[in-house]
Image (cartoon, rainbow, N blue to C red):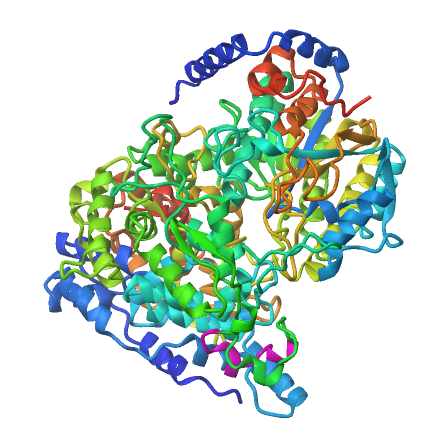
Amino acid sequence: MRKIPAFAAALLLATAAKAQTVASSPDAQHAYRFLAQATFGARPTDAQHLITDLKLNYTAWIQEQMASATGFSYQSIAKGLPCSVAASASLSTAVGASVTSICPSDVSQTFWLGAVNDASQLRQRVAFALSQIFVISVEDGSLTAWGDASAAYGDLLYRDAFANFRVLLDDITHSDAMGKFLSFLYNVQGSAPTSTSPGTVPDQNFAREVMQLFTIGLVKLDLSGEPILDAKTGQPIPTYSQNDVIGASNVMTGFGPYDYPKDIPSDFKYDGSLYGREDFQFKPTVSYPQYHSTIAKSFLSVTIPVSTTPNPDGDLKLFLDTLFNHQNVGPFIGKQLIQRLVTSNPSSGYVERIAAVFNNNGSGVRGDLGAVISAILLDPEARNDSSVTTPTFGKIREPILRMAQILRLLGGKPGADGTFGFAPYDPSLQLGQYPFLAGSVFNFYYPDFSPPLTALAAKGLVSPEMQITTTETVYRLDQFLAPIFAGAGWNVGGTTPSYAFTLDYGGWLPLVASNALVDQLNLAFMSGQMSAALQSDIAAEVSATKGGAQSQLAQALRVMIDSPEYIVQK
Amino acid sequence: MLAKASRRQFLRGVSSLAVAGAAPSLSAYLSAMASASAQTAGDYKALVCIYLSGGNDHINTIVPFDTASYNAYYAARGGVGLAFSQSQLLPGPSQGALQVAFNPNLPNIAALSAAKQATVVANVGPLIGPITKSQYAPNSALLPPLLASHIDQQKTWQSLGHANPQGWGGLLGDALSSGNGATGAPFTTVSANGETILFLTGTETSQYVVSGQGVPSAFFAAGSPFANALLHSTMSANLLEQAVGGVYQDLQDYAGELDKALPPVKSFPTLPANNGLAQELLTVARIIKIAPSSLGARRQIFYVNFGGFDTHDQQSTRHPPLMKQLDDAVNYFHQIMASAGLWSNVTLFTMSEFGRQLLPNNGGTDHGWGSHHLVMGGAVAGGIVGQLPTIGVVGPNFLQNGWMIPTTSVEQYGMALGSWMGVGASDLARIFPNVATYSETPVKLFF
């Protein structure tokens, strides 16, 4: 019998906790609303803890969450999941030693186990937000043999969620998974032109995207995140040019996996013998000076002169310090974190307040992500009741957020293989969005996407998640969820039921016969924000649905989860 | 609701200023375009954009083949194993002394070229105006902004400017939708990628979104409480809820019409395995087969997406399979269209945010600027359009790092395609306002 990892066993106990309900009240609505922004969904015990134990002291809740250590780990959970167990066995036989090989799909599976059941919910939610800024994806195949490194990357985001941004930036830049995905791993110095060849250049991939996507963005920003315009031309001012990319690409040479030359000293290239090797892939990259460029490197008004001795670590430190201290980082990263947690169109004042905290946490420290997250969630714009009815406030809950909330609130339990079954690559899956599987480093959607021909667009406002909210995707998602609601689980077994996951309707079914169902759905899923019209629509659907309480509950869930009111987290 | 008419008028007003300020040769240029393709009544035409996402390595797609060009290509790429041997390549068309060949994984496209049903469009890219190598300086005002950035060059290719809210496919759709009648108009522009695409965004024409899995159905009964729950948000004060509600409104208004007319997948040939592009093209083919008869559509613009082209590393193992999938998918679509007698009614064309640098890194290639593209279908003239470059970083056509300096603008490329669709001269001038600044000779893609 397959061994269930310790963490997963603890999860099973946690989900067995008795279903209960929380009475709707202004306090309860405030608690659920806060937890909708800060977690993957509030279970009754979570809400009760915030309301009763903490007396709605959000700061205390945040401190408690930031201090919580649950032992959740991508590396240890993923290697116990079926695909990885099988891959490890096969690899161990091949190399004649016991080695671990984590399947990339098990990294995604581990995401779901954490999102649904890890008690460090704030850390999970923030790590998910970070995974949408510092994107790695197995989509293009570059990480296919790097599941161990990808698991380590999941742990890195989870560990650094409240760390200093400079630490996060350093860890990402020393990650095999990022190194492989944006191809700075094994990047080598260029070669000068000769009589027979015009020469080669270093790979520019990471050098460009670390500036464009992970730190400073394309154009100079003021503290509120608005582009600073050139006084003469009225145009935005680029933060860097192609020459800066070239300079930075020379910095990003000579980095490879840990302990690499011991095994393969001759050639600095990808080598199959490292695949599935956690002893390499779990460790940060190290430098190999013989492959580092010694030519002059200029980036962002800094110049490293020609050197006789290659200095990869020193050059990298100077590059990352320069990025970290750029004025753009606070507003650029702060605004995206607000968009992932609270609202797609924060006011300039909101962005400015968060950027100011990034620049100085109150104790003179720059880049304190814990302080930034805390400030985002405690900001008046996030907390004020008036925001709920502000026409431009809120964000679309992307499919992953919807699914995670469904699993958390409806007692979702993994199937017999210990996973929720969301393995990527399966075209029959209809969720339309998978963790660590964006189409590219540009994430599932662009931060400035504005849905065409809408009032939102007419006002110049954005909704990134609308890029993947279309006639096609809303249909596929409904068709995926409807049978799950009806069957209280995801039956993937055809004629013989076999469940990828099950739902536990125990606490919910008794509510169907009373009027309490809609009230509880409203509170638990929508923080009490459901309009009277939607309440009556759901009630009418429930009355019109035949087949007993489970069918009625299923239809109520389907209508609510599909509804625009639910989809927009406010 | 939006005042769409006034927004459209505003756009026309702005454009007419641009036209008034354009070079005097514009009217001559436009009349040449118009005479090249007059719209005939009762016909059907579709443009299908194949978007090669990530920036295709054009030089290993359409490969220099005459001896001098090949030698320069091999000198740049051969040392790191990113050059094909001349004997592997599939010889293609010539332009004077210059000749190109096709990637060995493109046999079907090479055959289309030989049959004059595929045209190579050489060295296309975003331009402000014609530019020479000596005029280049990073971030110069003579250059389109934010060159070599994926997202910004995607926007520039699709909307002719990195901050434009509309794409030229959508603007062509605006000009064409009235000819599609009430039932066809909602399907004037169709994204088969599951996502909303800037290229297809018009000022009044809304793109319909389908995918390689098929087309959506309205899964809620009109007038039911379920429908009300999804649609009353179109009246909501919250603008994001309105936007989501609008998606359901489109489903209710249009999905049934398309879904019920669509021929089943099993009436089509078996798809090439593991080929997402072919899947999206199959959905396009299913729609095209019934669009003229069941929807009354006469002009349609489709978008399909094909990703994975950002080959910074391991290009020798990553790029060839992409070429093969492209070739298989085009061949699959060609077979379906040919057997339906529609091959001369459709034109496939490629876009990609940039080509890649001539100078490689140790195992791949980095972001460039200009790129070669393909236009395919029974109506194209074949051969090479535009100007093949002199290969090499010391020559006039490449910057020092190997960016190819475009000699044909995206606007010229788009205008030639829009002209084939029968869009009128004044609409073309509005949609492609700068085209006359590049050249006085229209790009001629079709007979």
**For the point 86% across and 54% down, which residue is it?**
B88
In front: B16, or A466?
B16
- Magenta stretch containing residue B302, yes or no? no
Instruction: Estimate the x, y position of residue A472 in percent, counting from the top left.
Output: 54, 43
In front: A331, or B168?
A331
Q: Is B366 on the left or on the right of B60, as rendered?
A: left
Magenta-highlighted residues: A272-286
Instruction: Estimate the x, y position of residue A152 in percent, counting from the top left.
Output: 45, 73
In front: B320, or A201?
A201
In the rendered view, would you say B331 is above or below A52? above
Whether residue B298 is visible? no
Instruction: Name the residue at the left extreme.
Output: A55
Whether residue B411 is visible? yes
Instruction: Estimate the x, y position of residue B403 in percent, counting from the top left.
Output: 62, 42
In the rendered view, would you say B169 is above or below A417? above
The answer to which image quadrant residue A15 occupies is bottom left
Number of residue marks: 0
In the rendered view, would you say B369 is above or below B37? below
The answer to which image quadrant residue B409 occupies is top right
In front: A271, or A11?
A271
Instruction: Estimate the x, y position of residue A32 in percent, counting from the top left.
Output: 23, 56
- Magenta stretch containing residue A281, yes or no? yes
